[in-house]
Amino acid sequence: MDWSILLDKTILIVIIFVISLAIAAYSTYGERKVAAFLQDRIGPDRAGPFGLLQPLADGLKFFLKEEIIPTASDKFLFIIGPCIFMMTALMTSAIIPWGMPLHFGSHVFSLQVADLNVGILYLLAVVSIGGYGIMIGGWSSNNKFALLGALRASSQMISYELSMGMAIIALLLLSQSLSIREIVDMQQGFHWNVFYQPVGFLIFLICAFAECNRAPFDLPESESELVGGYHTEYSSMKLGLFLFAEYINMFISSAIISCLFFGGYHFPGIDSLGLSPNWAAIVSIIVLFAKIFFFIFFFMWVRWTVPRFRYDQLMRLGWKILIPLSILNVLATGAWLTFFK
Amino acid sequence: MSQLIFFILSAMTIASALVVVFSKHPMYSVLSLVVCFFTIAGHYILLNAQFLAITHIIVYAGAIMVLFLFVVMLLNLNRESEPHKPGKMKFAATISAGMLFLILIAAMKSTTMETFSFPPPSTNGMIQHVGQRLFTDYLLPFEISSILFLSAMIGAVVLAKKEKH
């Protein structure tokens, strides 16, 4: 076992963990500010300058709230539910290449925790087990609304996973590789996959919204009909974990959308700047995060623009529109690659 | 190192499989079966079959077990509402399990314990390899099984379709 690799990876994992939590915390602030902007309000402005300390105040509040575990609930599963949800939200960050490698003398510090040769499949696997946290939490609450929310969440996730996988298959036909770093490096220059796979990108984006349970697909927790959905019975930091994990999911899916379809850490003209490798690496990290922040903003923009779907509309969109469309997209991509390339 | 991981994984696999059988509550059975699938996927990774490991998780833990969980949640099975099996059935179950045990002992009597050795790492489980083999040597079985799946899917759709009166 090479100890320097272990040390490198540990440092990187801790940094990514802290950044994910920080971005999730400030996404809540961003969400409220964006909502306020779209609704012509001011938004949080009391805690600190421009309300910047609001996430800290919210976090502190979560920790200090009374912890309520319903007596009729299954205590073990009730506690482990939000933990599993948080864990699966964080797991996907392992395969994202955050930038070009850094060079310290002869030592190369790769900014990716694991360059799996089945990276995309790992992504699909983690997405597919992402529903367990919600299902376990919703079921163990022993509450009708929570159970309904959990059932909605799991059926929604199963339905949209299919078209998500199909959209990725069309992308894989182009890239000929399942490693995310190779997919990102293939888009160097301005060969972003979104220009070659516009339909695939659209399907993937819609599915990402559905998998994150974000509006307009936030039926599992639709407050107007299910009180709070799967987290109705949760209080204190366990509720905090559910809400936090949703923002981490949003952050990670923005990162994955940027990597798969928008060139990841590449941007046109990075080679012509003539930067030294380390400076290029730093610029590449900033470029990736700029793309990620744009998509996080996009997630919020859609939430405060589009109203929630009805449940039958959600299912019809998933099964009758997105899946046939994504299969056609795979066929069209295959035909194009066979006859024109 | 990998031997240590192997033993830990094996212990976890056996323990979770036992929980599946012995757990009184169907919810815990389903969840420990999920844990069991994860540990088996770990064994695949130890054998350098990453593709198999990940598809195992996607198909079993991600799709099939979610449906199981779905059914358990919808039926809302409790210890109280579980039907108690009649004595005759218990008797038959004990007899048949005892006979199976006898057969197992008879089969294992003549086996010898071999020293445990780890197989050398091979690239057979890598996705490039699997894909190439599937689409050259095993193309016909692959296509036939995919047609089988397709017909199963169509069958399910036909069965689920409402009859028009």
Image (cartoon, rainbow, N blue to C red):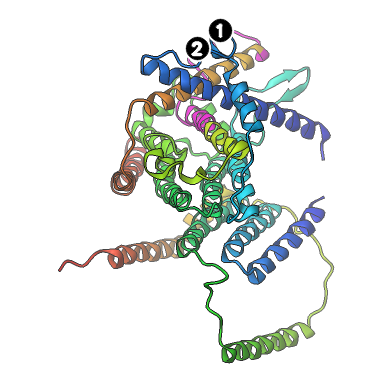
Q: Where in the figure is residue A105, as x and y percent of width and height?
A: 78, 17
Observer-nearest of A157 and A162: A157
Q: Where in the figure is residue A300, as x and y percent of width and height?
A: 43, 25
Whether the residues at callouts 1 and 2 have beta carbons within 8 Å, the answer is yes
Q: Where in the figure is residue B96, as x and y percent of width and height?
A: 63, 89
Horizontal side of residue B48 vs A24, given as left or right: right
Q: Secondary structure at mark 2?
A: loop
Which residue shows up at 74% across the image and 28% down it? Answer: A11
Q: How many marks?
A: 2
Which residue shows up at 52% across the image and 72% down it? Answer: B81
Which numbered dot is residue A273?
1
Q: Where in the figure is residue A277, as x and y percent of width and height?
A: 66, 14
Q: Residues within 10 Å of mark 1 (few under 14, many from 20)?
A: few
Which residue shows up at 30% across the image and 64% down it? Answer: B160
Quadrant where the N terminus of chain A lies?
top right
| Kind of residue at badge 1 | Leu
Above or below, comparing residue B10 to residue B85 in the picture: above
Regarding residue B62, the answer to whether it shows in the image is yes
The residue singled out by tag 2 in the image is A269
Query: On what subunit does the disc labeled 2 rest?
Result: A
Q: Secondary structure at mark 1?
A: loop
Q: Residues within 10 Å of mark 2 (few under 14, many from 20)?
A: few
Q: Is residue A47 magenta?
A: no
Regarding residue A99, the answer to whether it shows in the image is no
Residue A284, quarter of the rendered image: top right
**CA separation, marks 1 and 2?**
7 Å
Q: Which residues are magenta?
A: A250-278
Query: On what subunit does the disc labeled 1 rest?
Result: A
